[in-house]
Image: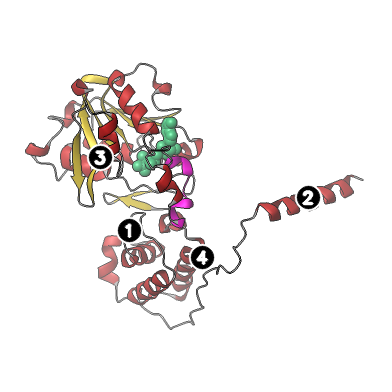
Amino acid sequence: MAKRATKAANKAAKKAAKKAAPRRRAGSKVPKVAKVAAGELLTLLDFVRYAVSRFVEADLVFAHGTTDPVAEAAFIVCEILHLHPDQFENFATARVTAAEAKSILDVIARRVSTRKPAAYLVNKIYMRGLPFYVDERTIVPRSFIGELLDQHFGGATDDEDSALIDDPLSVESMLDLCTGSGCLAILASRNFPNAEIDAVDISKDALEVAARNVGDYGLQDRLTLHRGDLFKPLGGKRYDLIISNPPYVDAEGMAALPRECRTEPKIAFDGGADGLDIVRRILNEAGRHLTPQGGLLCEIGRGRGTVEDAFPQLPLLWLDTEDSDGEVFWIAAADL
Ligand SMILES: C[S@@+](CC[C@H](N)C(=O)[O-])C[C@H]1O[C@@H](n2cnc3c(N)ncnc32)[C@H](O)[C@@H]1O
């Protein structure tokens, strides 16, 4: 009797799984990567060329740490071979073993068939040259704030004229709101070596990834992760610096997200109808969580005009990076 009940339950579960499984639209093709015979591709460069051809053929989108098929292919090849991407040129004409070739071809095929960003397939992303663990529980980090920390907050590329905090060593407390994988909080720990850091996210899944990265960098004693809605888990605590890369994609942008981004958590993007649901709350509440000499650094994507219309009284300072124009603002606590 019990056996029959289990069988029935299994059948029901199978039926439910079949129903829930995504179906191909009639006429749509699942891209297939043709088999490569052993010895057809020999060197790292051969595999990169092959991957680029497959990626272009499949019309992939590159927005997760790389911006073009060549960089994406080189990243994959290097990761499988346990090389830093900067080492590619040293070994470009070196041959790979049969086992390495199989692993590289497997990731190339999965990049095409699943559309997952390469970072998810190899569980790694580099930001400012540093490696971070990443998987589907959190967005693939690619914030402009990493570069801005180095440009304006005591990093290697900082110069006195562009400094937004006079003495990074004087920063004793810092908050990373919407921390995701924890990458920005970890990067910032290097710019502000004397800071105790809090990092908040609403997603339990994302915080599990962040905890792994915090552990990998040995920052458990200085960086505390909190689960909750923006400032709520922090009580009335104040900080010398708040950084945030919140969800800021508007409804139109959400509807047009490329397939690669649809493999990432929706909660990491969705900023409501005009993209400002979370940004508005951050701007309204940040003043109550900053010390008098503090400031807020916040990424908002392409919504500069919308933010300026919504907060015309605020003297926001718009910052550029190598690949962005006014997608991040700085505002001092005194101006909030
Ligand atoms: C754009 S991602 C940024 C992640 C990370 N800082 C980075 O730059 O890669 C936004 C993050 O905000 C989190 N989030 C969304 N709504 C939130 C809320 N109300 N309070 C706290 N975190 C939130 C999401 O879970 C996601 O991890």
Q: Which mark is residue 66?
A: 1
Comparing 127 with 299, the one in front is 299
SS at circle 4: helix
Q: Quadrant of residue 164?
A: top left
Q: Is residue 268 magenta?
A: yes
* Segment tinted magenta in the rendering: 259-269
Residue at 37 percent of width and 71 percent of height? 52
Amino acid type at mark 1: Thr
Amino acid type at mark 3: Val
Q: Is residue 57 magenta?
A: no
Residue at 43 percent of width and 83 percent of height? 40
| N-terminal label among 3 and 1 | 1
- Which one is closest to the eye, mark 3 or mark 1? 3
Residue at 27 percent of width and 45 percent of height? 144
Q: Is the residue 194 above or below the residue 130 in the image?
A: above
| N-terminal label among 3 and 4 | 4
Residue farthest to the left?
161
Q: Is the residue 175 above or below the residue 12 in the image?
A: above
Residue farthest to the top?
236
The figure's colour scheme reads secondary structure
Quickly name the residue at label 2. 12
| N-terminal label among 1 and 4 | 1
| N-terminal label among 2 and 3 | 2
